[in-house]
Image (tube, coloured by chain):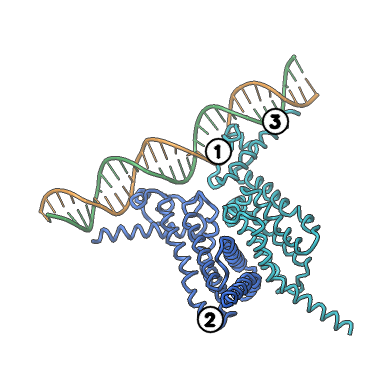
Chain colours: A blue, B cyan, C green, D orange
Amino acid sequence: MTRKEAKRLTRLRLLEAARQIVLAGDEQAIAASAVARAAGVANATFYEHFANMDELLRTIAEELFSKLREEVRGPRWEAIQAPNNEEKLRRQFRVPLEMLAANPRLFRLALRVRHQPRSALSESSLRLAGSTRRDVVQELIDRGYPASTPADMRRLEMIADVIIAAIEALSLGHLSGRYPSLEEIVDVLVLVSRGTRLVRETAQRQAAQRRASVDA
Amino acid sequence: MTRKEAKRLTRLRLLEAARQIVLAGDEQAIAASAVARAAGVANATFYEHFANMDELLRTIAEELFSKLREEVRGPRWEAIQAPNNEEKLRRQFRVPLEMLAANPRLFRLALRVRHQPRSALSESSLRLAGSTRRDVVQELIDRGYPASTPADMRRLEMIADVIIAAIEALSLGHLSGRYPSLEEIVDVLVLVSRGTRLVRETAQRQAAQRRASVDA
DNA sequence: CAGTTCACCGATAATACTCTCGGCGAAAGT
DNA sequence: ACTTTCGCCGAGAGTATTATCGGTGAACTG
């Protein structure tokens, strides 16, 4: 079935052309005609594959952002394997930093699109942001942060928001050349997270007290 | 000179119409004709006042973002007046939080536009971001953080970036309804900044040692 | 009061984009 | 081999925008 394959190929060519335009930062005024031109097919052919531009944009947004999510999330087990706690914490910051630095165009796209409710790309970007927050919250719970009351959960979400925002802001500084050394960035992130550990220690003390009173 | 006044008035009407469109989040596809229509003047009249859309956008960007800067920066003296150090720190977080929460459309515009190099609005937004960072760095220096070496300065800029990113991220969470209580947000910000104070204490200890060795 | 300026406007040329329609030619079916 | 399918395309109707040009009448000038 060569015909199906050919169609799949032109669809892929259209998607790839659009991906390049979007990653280059020109997604504002992206036009079906421009995508078709870049893909080397006629204008009308675009509409054989997609009902309109939004449908194509939603497709590539899904691909790009789920890829970014996997890239940032995937190597976490590696971070967890670290020999001691200090190094484990450093890796949990270093791994996402490296991933964002390695995908600057995709990272910048995610930032650009996040606050643009009218864009077809924003929905996927927001889903990515939401799942990242959930992941970080889960990580905090695994590290022993308290999560029993709604107020606890709100605090964990806030801490997660701060950690994510910090990693993003410093990655951006790295990409723009202001902070050339990733290790210096990790130093600051470790420093910042030191304050939040008070939350955990308080919770552990309280848990110990609870255990003691049960024993008594 | 009623004619000059009339002209100034229609210019203001055009600016106000554009401001509303931009703050409503429709700055992507904003058109000269749409602005003229909203301002109640003919299309051609737009070009009596501005050479093109970009010129108008740069004008309102300058106005809006310098206003936002003043609003966030202005009440700082009030924060500094606080009775004790703990309350002073809390106010230094609370004041910008309240300002961002009080200007949600403008705040969201600043976020939206920041990573959009092709937008006529981005330049002003980036200037705002840069000056905010300088302000926060200065604040850290005033609070006794070390700033003698380039590495010190980089660290202060990173800490400032983290503080700003944290305030913005949590303000956004507040606006989206996730964190209804500003006091809970301030709690988390205080917690986070606790870790960075290690930098200051180390510097002060070193300064004390220097003084001691000079005395000796 | 006569002449001039000028803020505004209607009309329009030029440009760009979306989406559809009918046809063509090669692959697929029988 | 003959027919059908279908992926692609050229052309074009419909729509929206930018930017300009000449006209108009009221404000300004002397």
The quadrant in which residue A160 appears is bottom right
- Residue A180 seen in this snapshot: no
Residue A33 % position (x, y): 42, 49
Residue at left offset 30%, top offset 57%: A7
The residue pinned by badge 3 equals B6
Tag 3, which chain? B
Q: Which amino acid does label 1 sit on?
A: Ala
The residue pinned by badge 2 equals A82
Tag 2, which chain? A
Q: Do the residues labelled 1 and 3 touch (CB within 8 Å)?
A: no
B43 or A212, which lies in front? A212
CA gap between label 2 and label 1 equals 58 Å
Q: Do the residues labelled 2 and 1 touch (CB within 8 Å)?
A: no
Q: What element carries label 3?
A: helix
For mark 1, does the 10 Å Cα neighbourhood hold few (<14), some (14 to 19), or many (20 or more) residues?
some
Residue A209 % position (x, y): 61, 74
Asked whether, in this view, residue B80 is left or right of residue B189, the answer is right
Residue A154 % position (x, y): 58, 61
Q: What element carries label 2?
A: loop
| A67 versus C18 height, above or below | below
